[in-house]
Amino acid sequence: MKIAGITSLEDLPRICPLLSRYGNPQYGEDETRVVEVGSARFGGERPVVIAGPCAVESEEQTLRIAKEIKAAGADLLRGGAYKPRTSPHDFQGLGEEGLEILSLAREATGLPFVTEVMDTRLVEKVAEHADMLQVGSRNMQNYPLLKEVGRAGKPVLLKRGMAASLCEWLGAAEYIAEEGNYDIVLCERGIKAYPSGEYSRYVLDLNVIPAVKLHTFLPVIVDPSHATGVAMMVEPASRAAVEFGSQGLIIEVAAGGRCLSKPQCDAAQAIDPGTLRRIVDFIHAREQIFAEREAV
Ligand code: PEP
Ligand code: MN
C-alpha cells in the first residue's frame, strides 16, 4: 500500500528531476557541481570553511571575529542579521544594520559572507548585500521563500530541516533549482532524534553525507556547531564530517573565545579562533597526505 504524502528514495527522480543524479545525468557518477562564492569552491578541491558569529551583535564584534577567522584560514564569513529565535523576547538580530556590518567586514578582510534570510519580503535586500543566502533549518519547507531565493541570483546555502528526510530536503532544493538557480549547497545541521537535548543539541547525521552524494550532484557541507550545541564537540565533529566526505563546514566562533566575549546567541557552542585554526590545519594536512599519496 502506498501512503499518501510518504516518499522514499525511489521517488527522487520524480520529485527532483532537475537535481537527482538519475533524473539529470549531466554530472558523472562521482562528479559534484562546483558552487563558487568569491574564490571559495564548494565541491572543489578541498572542503570550504565558513566561520563567524552566530549573530552580528556589533561592528566591533563582527570585525574582530572576521579578522580572527581570516587569520585562522577560513574561506567565508557567516553571521546572522535576522535571527530565528525560539522566543520573540530574545535578541532578534540587528536587521539591515547587521547586513551593513557584514559588508564592512567583507571590505576589511576580503572574505565573502553568507547570512540567513527568513522572509520573502527581505530576499531582495539581503541579496543586495550578501554573497550567499542561507535558508535556515526552520524554513527548509517554506516554499514561497525557496522560490524567492531561487530568483535572487545568489548562491544558496540550504540547511536541512531538523526533522526532514533526505527526500524532503532534496525536494526543497528542487524548488530553488526550478527557478533556474542550481548554485545550491546543502548543509546537514543535526536532526531531532531520540537523545536530542540530553547530552547534545541535535544528533549529527553523518550517514546522510554519502547518501546525499549518491542521489544528487550538489555539494554538501556540515554545521557541527548547531548539530552538537557543545563547543567541546565541535572540533571532533568537524573532523568526523570531513572523514565522511563533507565538502565544507560552517562553524560558529566567538572573538577571543566564548568566555571572554559572551555571545548573546548560542554561546555554549561557540569555539575560539585557535580551535578553528586546528580544524583548518586538519583539513590542509589531510589534503596534503592525499596529494602525496597520489604523487607516488
Ligand atoms: C544559523 O546557522 O544561524 C542557524 C540558525 O542554523 P539552523 O537554521 O541550522 O538552526
Ligand atoms: Mn547559532
Image: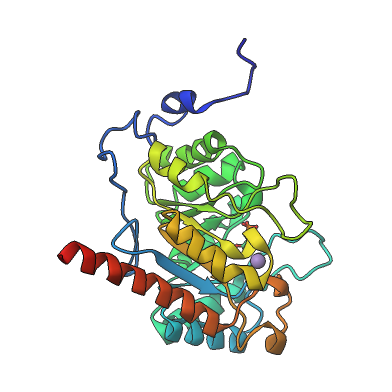
Left or right for 182, reference 86: left
Determine which quarter of the picture holds residue 228.
Answer: bottom right
Measuring from the top left, give residue 206's x and y in whole percent. 53, 51
Residue at the (62%, 23%) spot, across then down? 6
Q: Residue 277's spot in the image, x, y percent? A: 47, 81
The quarter of the picture where the N terminus appears is: top right
- Could you tell whether 294 is left or right of 189 in the image? left
The chosen color scheme is: rainbow
Residue for point 80% across, 68% down:
90
Residue farthest to the top, as pictured: 1
- Quadrant of the frame with the C terminus: bottom left
Q: Quadrant of residue 258?
A: bottom right
Which residue: 63% across, 23% down?
5
Q: Is residue 90 visible?
A: yes
Q: Quadrant of residue 71?
A: bottom left
Q: Residue at x 46, y 65 (%)?
A: 128
Q: Position of residue 255 (x, y in %)?
A: 60, 86
